[in-house]
Each structure stands twice: as structure tokens, then as C-alpha cells.
Amino acid sequence: MFARILSTLLVFLTAAMFTFATPAIAGDAASGAKIFSANCAACHAGGNNVINGAKTLKKDALAKYEMDSIEAITYQVNNGKNAMPAFKGRLSDAQIDDVATYVLSQSEKGW
């Protein structure tokens, strides 16, 4: 009886672990670094922003402007905003995922 309860509990805990696990970062940061260098670094070198110095790619600024997720960064890169051009159609979805992964990973490292 105890073994059956323990087995059921382990199955439940394993399922819960996969259900509530933090999603993996989708893109390839190394590829994203190359794409960022070719397309983004002119305005965002070192995680800065030459157009609007408050809206950098640094961790605290990304959090402040609710841009601290792969989804938010991907949306921004796809659609652009204000002086930032949209890259949808210029870069593939995979390339945009890679850039978003790179930006988020660099923000975690402090650029």
C-alpha cells in the first residue's frame, strides 16, 4: 500500500515539475550575437540605446518597461516602436528568437 501511494505521489510531483517549470529560452544566443552585431549594435552597442538613453537593454530597464521576457523582446523586434524599425520580414522568426535570447542572456550577465 505504501509503495502504491509513494508511486502515485512521485508521478504527481513529476507532472507538476514539468507543468510549472520555467520555459527554456527558445533561441541560440551565439547566433543571436552575430545577428545583433549586424542589425542592432549601431543603436544598442553594449546594451545601450543611442536614441533614448533611458530605454536600454540593461536588466533593470528591461524590467521597468516590461521588456524582460523572450516574448516581449520578440514582439518589439518584430514590430518596432518609435525610432526602432520593425524587423519582421527582414529577419526570419528563428533569427528574431536568437536575437531575443541573446539580449535577455546579455542583460542577465550585465552586458
Image: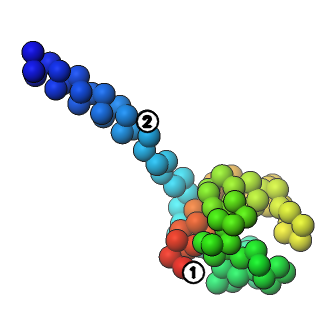
Q: From what the image shows, is residue 96 above or below residue 33?
A: above
Farthest top residue in view:
1
State which tag comes first along the sequence, 2 or 1. Answer: 2
Q: Is residue 47 above or below residue 14?
A: below
Q: Amino acid at mark 1?
A: Trp
Q: Residue at x 66, y 52 (%)?
A: 71
Residue 56: % across, % down: 71, 76
- The image quadrant of residue 46 is bottom right
The quadrant in which the N terminus is found is top left
Whether residue 6 is situated above or below residue 102 in the rendered picture:
above
Q: Name the element at disc 2.
A: helix
Q: Quadrant of the C terminus?
A: bottom right
Q: Nearer the viewer, residue 35 or 60?
A: 60
Residue pictured at 73% horizontal, 64% vertical: 65
The residue identified by callout 1 is 111
- Which numbered tag is attached to residue 19? 2
Location of residue 37 in the rendering, given as x and y in whole percent from the top left corner = 67, 78
